[in-house]
Every structure is written in C-alpha cells, then in structure tokens.
Image (spheres, rainbow, N blue to C red):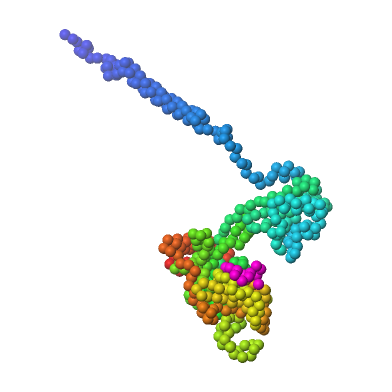
Amino acid sequence: MESQSDKTQDPIEQAGASRPSANVYKSVEDRLAAQQRRKRARLRFTITAFLMGGLISWMAADLLVPDIAKATLSAKPAPSTPVISDELRALPPMQRDYELDALGNGDTLAALLTRANVHAVEADAALDQLRSVYDVRRLKPGQSVRLHREWPAGQDKTTHEGRFAGFDFIPVPEQKIIVRRTGFQSFTAIKRDRPLSDRHFLADGLINSSVYEAARSSGMSPNLVVELIRLFSFAIDFQRDIREGDQLEVLYTRRFDENNQVAQEGDIVFASLTNRGKRYAYWRMLQEDGSENYFDANGQSVQRLLMKTPVDGARLSSRFGMRRHPILGYTRLHRGLDFAAPIGTPIYAAGDGVIQRIGTYGNNGKYIRIQHRNGYETAYAHMNRFARRLKKGSRVKQGQIIGTVGRTGLATGPHLHYEVLHYEKPVNPRELNVPPQRNLDATALADLAQLKIDIAEKVSGLAASDNSLRSLPRRRSALAPQ
C-alpha cells in the first residue's frame, strides 16, 4: 500500500509536467526560420527578375532599334541654309554700328552710298553682289536702308572713323536683303525670309466727328481706316448718314517679326458700325477660289455692283438734280454728284467693268466712262490725269485707281463729277440699290455661323483683357451670332 508521501508529487515536477517538450520548441523555430528563408528567396527572385527584365529591354533596344545617329542613309539630306554663313563666321570679331537713310524721289542706292561717304570702289563691289539676289530697279522712294560701319574689337568707335561694313533693307515685310563685307573690298549678299505672325487688336469707340477720326483714335493705321471706310461705303453715305454717338467696332490684325516689331498692317477681320440705331456688321471669309470677301449676317456679300462714292475724303459740293449752272448761268439737270477734293486725290473705279471712253471730252475735261454689268455705266469728269496703261477696252476692277481729281474742262475748282447711268438713263448715285455680288450657299452659311462664333469669342477675350485699344464696354448683342 502506497504511503501518503508517495501520492504527493514534488511541485517542481508538477510544473515541469505542464511545459512543452524541447522537441516542440525546436519545431516552432524551424518553421519560423523556413518562413524567413522563403521571404528572402522571393525577394531575391523579384530583384533578379527586375534586373534581368531591364537588361533584356536594353539589349533589345540596342540590337533591334536602329541608332539614328549611326544610321546609314541611302541619300545624304540637303543641309539647311545657315543663318550665318561660314564666310561670315570666319571673320574676326568687330564692333558695328549703323545709320539710317532712305531713298528720295529719283534717288538711287548708289547715290545713297555716295552721300554716306562710301568709297566708289567698295560701293560698286557691294552693289555687284546685291544684283545677284535683288533687282535694284524695284526699289521705290521712301525705302529705308541701314548703312553699317565697323571697328576692331576693343577700340573706341568715337575716335575711330570705321570702315564701310555693308547695308541691309527690307523690300517687302516677308523678306530682308543683307549685304556684308567679307574682306578687303569684297562683299556677300544674302536674301533672308522673315517669318511673320498675326496678332489681333480691337478698336471700339464712339464717333464724335467722323469714322476716320474714331478709328484712328482707337489705334488703327490710316491705310486700314481707308479700307474700313470703303467697306461701309456700299451701304452708308458718309456725307449725310453718320451721326455723333454712332458706335464703331473693328477686329483687325497686325503682323509682327521675330523681334516682336510691327512689320505690316494686317486685315480687318470683323467690322460693325451702328448708324442711327441700325447695326451694319460684316465678317471676312475665305472663299473656295482663294479670295476673301466680307459678308453680312445673312450671307450676302458686302461688295455691291457699284460704289456710291468713288473717292476718299471728299466733300459733296453739288447734288443730283436740277440746278443753276455756276458758270453757264442757266438751270439744267445735274446728271451726277460733285465731290470737292484736292488736286491729285485718287479716284477709284466704282465697279468691275470695261473702259468705253478715255480722254478729253468737251466741257467734262479729262473723262473716263466705264461699262458695267446689268446695263450700268459710270462716268468720271474733270480729272487731272489718268492712271498709266489705261486705254479704251481696258478692264478695271472695283476699287482700282483710274486717275486723280483735277479741274479740267468747265470747272470752278478741283472736284470729281461722278455719274451713274442705267441703260443710258442718269440715276442718283445716292439712291443706288444694286444687288450683292454673291450670296453664300447652305454649306458656306454653316461655315459663316461658326466663323461668327469664333470671332465673338476672340473679341470677348480681347475686351476682357487689358487691351489699350478698348474704349467702351462690350455689347453682347453686337457680336452674338444670329
């Protein structure tokens, strides 16, 4: 029989009996170590795969894609024209300056060089090179020319006379002609294109005295203002229709060179004139034949068969109808309009047509008569001179200069007598109601609608910006597509 002491176990032994065995500890540690080894193996595999992928991609690009820099071409491309030729690049460094001169009436480029004290031998050498790229006979009075002189680098030009280094000029906005010294009495000539970019400007103002003054005060150039007046002259009589408070709105362009300088006046893109509460709005649109014409909101061309006023800046001095003749002293029908203007003021053909008579014609003095379509004729009397190369049978275009204002024949002062005849019957030029030259079809009308939207957005953008040409707040209805 067991004793009581045998039944009672030692406490330490009891605690030892409740712990896991050493084999259990070893199994857990092995599993943890195996997990760590698997993680490290996956990481090494990922890094290795990434590096191998990059290496394979690089090898494929190097072996399969041709190296453009090392490619062998079947034909050598033509090199582009350098801005500075090797001949000029090889010249020693010099400091240069220029003076500006211009051709006068009857002047020549050779005479201009002589005035600038250029030695005759050097002037001839420079002009010989110029003739290889440009015909000097095309130069016109007023052409600006820059004359260059040069000094060795480091010398004070105020104490050094300098030598003639060449000249340059811009015959047309898109082109520049450069003549430069390349050595002792030797020069080279270069014809260089000038890239130009268009920028839009907005003229917006109230008319206080005249359309011309309102447009000029808004920043438009004189030539562009003349185009603007001619554009509205088909619908508006500037002598009697314009009122103070009428509103003018014009979107136009200017062309800038690479130096951000104005190189050329551009075009009128959109023009609107509110006259006596009625708005006349015209948009410039490119046609299929390459021409550009102005159209109203209904797709009718602004240009009509005939112009109401074939002379700019003139004052109406005598109206159509019965009147007492200022020289003959008796009353008779005045068959046209008289426009008083200075001698030499240009006269334009009122429409496309063929000259039926040109020369001196009795009391009319120097006289031109033009046959137009639809039985219309126009006559121009008391002219000072005719445009060159005009004769009977010559075709003229609307707006073409056919002569100038004079006082030949029976006249009390310089003026243009302008007549319009319809099937040989005189009509009042102010009451002309001739049809437009063209109307847009359905496809072109859709293009016009989109053009109106684009121009409205452009005008709104200019009006919202800090535009120095803006003078009035925008009127939404003025540009909203109709």
For this rendering, which residue is in front, 150 or 26? 150
388 within the magenta span = yes
Instruction: Provide residue 56's location: percent of width, then percent of height.
Output: 47, 28
What segment carries the magenta color? 386-401
- From what the image shows, is residue 152 above or below residue 33? below
Q: Residue 265: horizontal and vertical position, in percent?
A: 61, 62
Residue 448 falls left or right of residue 366:
left
Question: Which part of the image, by quadrant, shows the N terminus?
Answer: top left
Give coordinates of residue 447: x percent, y percent.
45, 60
Residue drawn at x 18%, y 9% as measured from the top left: 2
Quarter occupied by residue 337: bottom right
Percent across and percent down for residue 7 are 21, 13
* Camera sees residue 467: no
Residue 137 sits in quarter: bottom right
Figure check: 292 above or below 176: below
177 or 370: nearer the eye?
370
Q: Main secondary structure of the magenta part?
A: loop
Farthest residue toward the left?
1
Work out whether residue 2 can be spotted.
Answer: yes
445, above or below 369, in the image: above
